[in-house]
Amino acid sequence: MANLSISGLRERIFNGTKHEQNVARNSNPFAATSFKGNVLTADVFETVKPSIAQKVSSKSKLMYSALVGSISGIGERINRGVESVVSFCGRMKDSAVGFWNKMNDIEISLDFANAGKSIKSRWDAMQDEHTVQKYLTMPAGKTEGKESLESMLISELGLNVAA
Amino acid sequence: MKDRRNVKNIIEALSRHQDPDSIRVLNEVGTNSAIDEVREMTSRALVKKNVHDALEVVISNKGKGINDLSTLVAMSTINELLALEDKTEAIKILEDTVEHHSEEDVRDNARSVKALMALSC
């Protein structure tokens, strides 16, 4: 039906070779050589079968719609991402503000004076215990040639007690 | 006020000392001191020993331990007696003092402390 075109009739009339059909269907006269013997089988009179065209078209439409959809989806995702970033930043801001408010509510006082006294008293207690442990190795009463706790106590109290 | 940190350490060492002579040192030197603080530390050290000879010094001697003229020394000694985990020996000496001591003041003090000890048990 489509073979009624002028070019198609001319080819049919003047080309009587056995490859008529193949050559006639090729719109390129050098196709036999240019494609190294591989003849294209596309029908020049029937450019594209409607069904295929429809399929391609519908496929393309689907593809394009999918592409567009995906692009728009990407946009939405980007939008969502941006929104999530914004909300994240908002939450961070709220958290920071909340933290700051809490910090303002909490009264922190560092009593360095009492801390210093406490440390000193603990240090003194530790030193005293060390001293007592050392004294425990000494004799309690007066002993010849040795320092005793008795003589030390008398000396500390400033007593004039004859040995 | 003079820092008696070393005196305190010596008395503390005497209170922990295993040598019985430490009781004599505390009795002769510590309880005869003119300084209330030293007598107080000495009396408490003797109570901490929780042995007969040491407790006898602060319970049955006039002018020492619970019978000291200083309220601070007497009250500190009583507090230390009340804080003892094992009060058996202290109560025994208190009873002996109440019954046999020649001085009435000492007997009265011992009786009062004995009553407190009974309440705290």
Image (tube, coloured by chain):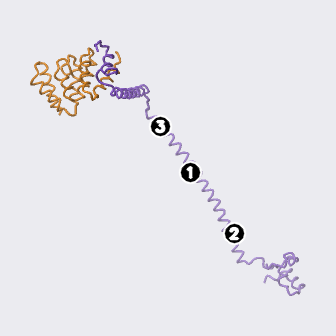
Chain colours: A purple, B orange
Disc on the earlier residue, 2 or 1: 2
Query: Residue at label 3?
Result: A101
Mark 2: secondary structure: helix
Looking at the rendered image, the disc whose residue lies closer to the viewer, 2 or 1, is: 1
Q: Residues within 10 Å of mark 2 (few under 14, many from 20)?
A: some
Mark 3: secondary structure: helix
Which residue is depicted at the point 42% across and 25% down?
Answer: A113
- Give the CA distance from mark 2 to mark 1: 34 Å
Mark 1: secondary structure: helix
- Give the CA distance from mark 2 to mark 3: 59 Å
Task: Judge from the rendering whether residue B114 lies leftward or rightward of residue A129; answer left or right.
Answer: left
**Which part of the image, by quadrant, shows the N terminus of chain B?**
top left
Q: Between residues B15 and A3, which one lies in front from this camera angle?
A: B15
Tag 1 near tag 3, CB within 8 Å: no
Answer yes or no: are tags 2 and 1 on the same subunit: yes
Return the x and y of residue A43 as percentages of the image width and height. Answer: 79, 79
